[in-house]
Amino acid sequence: MNQSFFESTAFKKIMAKVYGLGAAVVILGALFKIKHWPMADPMLIIGMGTEVIIFAISAFEPLHKEIDWTLAYPELAGIDTEDKNKGTISQQLDKMLVEAKVGPELISSLGNGLKSLSDNVGSLKDLSSAGKGYELTVHKYKFEEYGIPQSRHRIIIIGIKKKFQLKFKVPKPSLKIITSREALQNIPPDAFNNELTNNSKDVIERLKYIKPGKGAFNSNLPKHLALNVKGAKISQIYKRLDPNKPAYTVTGSGGGGTHVYHWKENRALTNRERARLQTFPDHYIFSGSKESVRRQIGMAVPVKAAKIIFNSILKTFARIEYPCVDEKF
């Protein structure tokens, strides 16, 4: 098949370098202007001119071709959130998880990617030279050590301009452990966002075989309820809470099996129960559909954790000492 130069691999390789080198010229021109260096105006014109030329060339790039993923994953075909015969989107995704062939290579790749994130965080220190410079504190917080009823680990960066001659110190964890049972007790019966999820019969039946703290991949499930994903061990799929420990990480996305499950009752948690694990007060009302609310809760920073960090920031600027630990990630 005849292929134009603009659709060729050579053009794509050239454009990759053009974008990188062009961006460098544009930034250099802007830097001259910002710092009021000699020849600032000509350099800015050169930078903007380079950008114009790049945009002009990019106009000839072929349109992105949408990939028909159903050719590789037939399970994706025909998903319709309003198809009542097939059930809800959550139930369809639950079925897909069972039928899809998720290989160990994919799971391994995901694990390696997360590891590389931790390995490369040290490069964030380079930000300290940005502009006039910031004094950075980079720390991996384990929120369960701060009285949050959830094992949620996040790297948080606090930067303070060096002109203030201040450095944020990581607040010392209380090491007070709050269990899932403690967090979910005494929820008012009329609490907002506390609707039960309509779990399918298969989900309810599967949960009957899963013990507290266990999931679908480390439980003895009957053959008709087992998940047919060879070589993969996704530890949080259909995982029940352990009532005597903090919850595992509450997420805001994912299909069947990712909704966090009660340690005793054969059901997924309600959004209010998830909000409790994220330390939202019961009077806080979430707006939107049930799935939208689940997403809002799962993507949030635990309220109590945010309060601890921001209180420490305020104390830093007020030059008030507080218990702290060394930063590490």
Image (cartoon, rainbow, N blue to C red):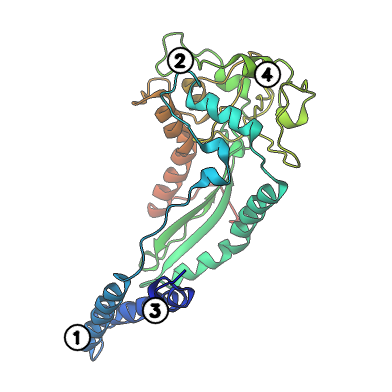
Q: Which structural element holds mark 1?
A: helix
Q: Which residue is mark 3?
A: 18
Residue drawn at (42%, 48%), measured in percent from left and top? 315
Give the mark nearest the N terminus, 3 or 4.
Answer: 3
**Comparing labels 1 and 3, the label whose residue is closer to the camera:** 3
Give residue 256's quadrant in the image: top right
Give the alpha-carbon distance from disc 1 to disc 3, as whole Å: 23 Å
- Cβ–Cβ below 8 Å for labels 4 and 2? no
Tag 1: amino acid: Asp
Give the alpha-carbon distance from disc 1 to disc 4, as whole Å: 68 Å
**Comparing labels 3 and 2, the label whose residue is closer to the camera:** 3
Residue drawn at (23%, 91%), measured in percent from left and top? 39
Q: Position of residue 156 (x, y in %)?
A: 50, 51
Q: Which mark is residue 207?
A: 4
Residue drawn at (66%, 42%), measured in percent from left and top? 102
Give the alpha-carbon distance from disc 3 to disc 4, as whole Å: 55 Å
Q: In the visual, does 216 lie left or right of 165?
A: right
Q: Say which of 285 and 98 sits in front.
A: 98
Q: Which residue is mark 1?
A: 41
Give the mark nearest the N terminus, 1 or 2.
Answer: 1
Give the mark nearest the N terminus, 1 or 4.
Answer: 1
Q: Position of residue 309 (x, y in %)?
A: 47, 45
Tag 4: amino acid: Leu
Q: In the visual, does 248 lie left or right of 86?
A: right
